[in-house]
Each structure stands twice: as structure tokens, then as C-alpha cells.
Image (cartoon, rainbow, N blue to C red):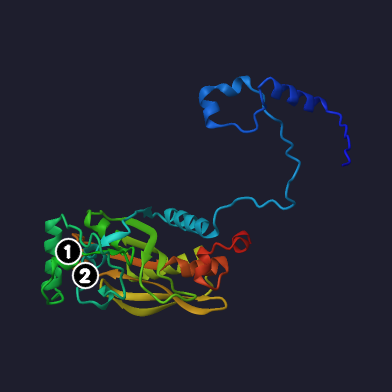
Amino acid sequence: KISKEVYAIATAKGIEELEAERSGSTLITQLTPQMLKSGDWKDRKFAEYDVRSGLHKEMMLGKKHAYKQLLLEIKQKLVGMGFAEEHGPLVEMEFWNMDALFMAQDHPAREIHDVFQVEDPARGEILDKKLLANVRKAHEHGLEGSKGWAYKWDPEVAARLVLRSQTTTVSARNLAKGLKPPKRIFCIGRVFRPDEIDWKHFIEFNQCEGIVLDEKMSFRELLGYLKEFAVEVFGAKEVQFQPSYFPFTEPSVEMYVNIPGRGWAEVGGAGMFRPEMLSALGVKVPVLAWGLGIDRLAMIKLGLKDIRDLFTQDLKKLRS
């Protein structure tokens, strides 16, 4: 067996640490909450750190997620246009998601393939009985010269809980509170719809809802709002409007934008809220309304070709 003696010369710093260890006063390498609370750190010595050693050549600094930053910019833009932000629950009664919007209870959009129904608890409670009666009348017999949908409206169906399929629920709730014109409000939030997932469809997405209460507003102003929103906020180069139908607006349009490399995609609907709906909620002035799929518009702004990339966990894509 061969042994070998090795000699080393301790530096002054090394000697200091050895003496500290022998005396029981070991240098602190990590400051803990307990030390801060007890004040023990005041009489202890801290180990020195060499911040120059072991640094990675490329530092990846933290930053806000690009999509989250874009949503913040959208909110700031709308606030700058005179809109106030509102919020609402993700789990809603069908009353607010559909009935208050003058959507008949046999409408296809209320079926299980178009809305996520909550199993437990299955129902909520509608507390405003006057509002309940007004909505019932609008559906069964009509308001403002309308004949309604001519069927027996069921409050049990209206009380069913669903994941909201549109942020128009927020507009309905606020209109029922008695908003006074002129008033502009918006909501940006998640909505949920069963769908086949592909490059432009997802079961959960962000929607931007906006309404304007003003006696002087018209359908022309609505189209102007939408085009300005798509062009100035998202950088859309081409925007088209096509006539459409929604149970709660008349006239109604759908807005399409051209996504580079993908072609035209529908990004939302808009229109003037119907008098039957507004009357049931106690509103007597015209209301412009729109609901836009922010995710598809964000694809233009962020240069994406697949809506799923908005929520990717791929660090290379997030850092680019």
C-alpha cells in the first residue's frame, strides 16, 4: 500500500473559516425566515459569494407572457376610448347566459354539444322576481310590439348552471342594474364551448365583449368601432363584415379578418341589442354590442398560425 502526503497552504480566508467552525460560529450561507424572526443573524458572519463564478453565457431574463401583455394593451386601448372594465362569473345560470338575451329555450345553442353544463350543483337561484317576470313575458308573449317566441317558458331550465359560453352575460348583468346613458363598458374573459380543436378552434378562449349605451349611436358607429379595434389594436390589414343572425341583436354582423398564411377567419359577432331584450332588462335606449374572439385576432398580432401556440409551454417559442 502506497501512501502519499499532500501539503496545502491555507489562505487567510480559509483560516478564518476553520477557526469559525472550531468555535461553533459557522458562517451563514443561507438566510432563513427563522433567523430574521429571532434576530440571530445580527451576531453571525455571512459567507462571501463570488457572483462572477459559474455564470451562464446567455442570461434568460424574465418577461411577461406575450399574450398576457397583449391583453393588457387591449384593456388600456379600450379604457383610452372611454370604456370601463367589468367582470362576471365563469359559472353562470342559463338565465344570464341565454334567457336574458332573448334566446329561446329550444334554441340549438343551448344543447349539450354547444355548452358545458355543470353537474353539481346543477342549478342556481334567480333572486330578482320582477326581472324574472319580464323575461318570461318577453319569451312567451313578447315586448315592444314583438310576439315573443310563443312557448311556455320554464324557470327551471333558466336556473341550470353552465360554464358561460359568451361574455355577453356580463353585459346583461350590468344592463339589468340600470346603467344610465351615455355609458361604455367592456369585459375580457374566458368562455367555454365544446368544439373540435384545430388551428383556429379551442374549447376555451378569451372573448372581448363591449357595449355602448347612447341615444345618438347607430349601426354605422358600431362598424367603425369594430374596424378600428381590429386594425389599430391587432394590426389587421383586411377586415370584412357579413350579415348574420343572433337571437339578441338586430341588425347583426360577423367580422372576418385575414390571418397571414391561413386566410380569412371569423373573429366575432356584433349588432344592436333587440328591443325585446332591452325592455325586459329595463333599458330604453339603443345599445351597440359586440363579442370578439381575442385569440384569433392575437394570432395576427403575434404572428402565429395555430391558436394553441397562445398557450404553449415550449420555452423556445416563449423566449423568441
Image quadrant where one finds the N terminus: top right
Residue 235 shows in the view: no
Residue 180 vertical position relative to residue 10 in the rendered view, above or below: below
The tag earlier along the polypeptide, 2 or 1, is 2
Left or right, 4 with respect to 319, comes to right
- At 60% from the left and 50% from the top, the residue drawn is 62
Residue 129 vertical position relative to residue 102 in the rendered view, above or below: above
Residue, disc 2: 102
Q: Nearer the viewer, residue 85 or 66?
A: 66
- At 26% from the left and 71% from the top, the residue drawn is 248
Q: Residue furthest front?
A: 1
Residue, disc 1: 280
- At 34% from the left and 54% from the top, the residue drawn is 87
Residue 244, image quadrant:
bottom left
Q: Spatial distance from mark 2 to mark 1, Cα to Cα?
A: 9 Å
Coordinates of residue 213 in the picture (x, y in percent): 29, 60
Residue 49, image quadrant:
top right
Left or right, 39 with respect to 102, comes to right
Asked if the residue under mark 1 is in contact with the one under mark 2, i.e. CB atoms within 8 Å, the reply is yes
**Disc 2 versus disc 1: nearer the observer:** 2
Q: Nearer the viewer, residue 52 or 275?
A: 52
Coordinates of residue 140 in the picture (x, y in percent): 11, 72
Image quadrant where one finds the C terminus: bottom right
Q: Amino acid type of disc 1?
A: Ala
| Element type where label 2 sits in the image | loop
Left or right, 170 with respect to 68, comes to left
Few, some or many residues within 10 Å of mark 2 (<14, 14–19, 20+): many
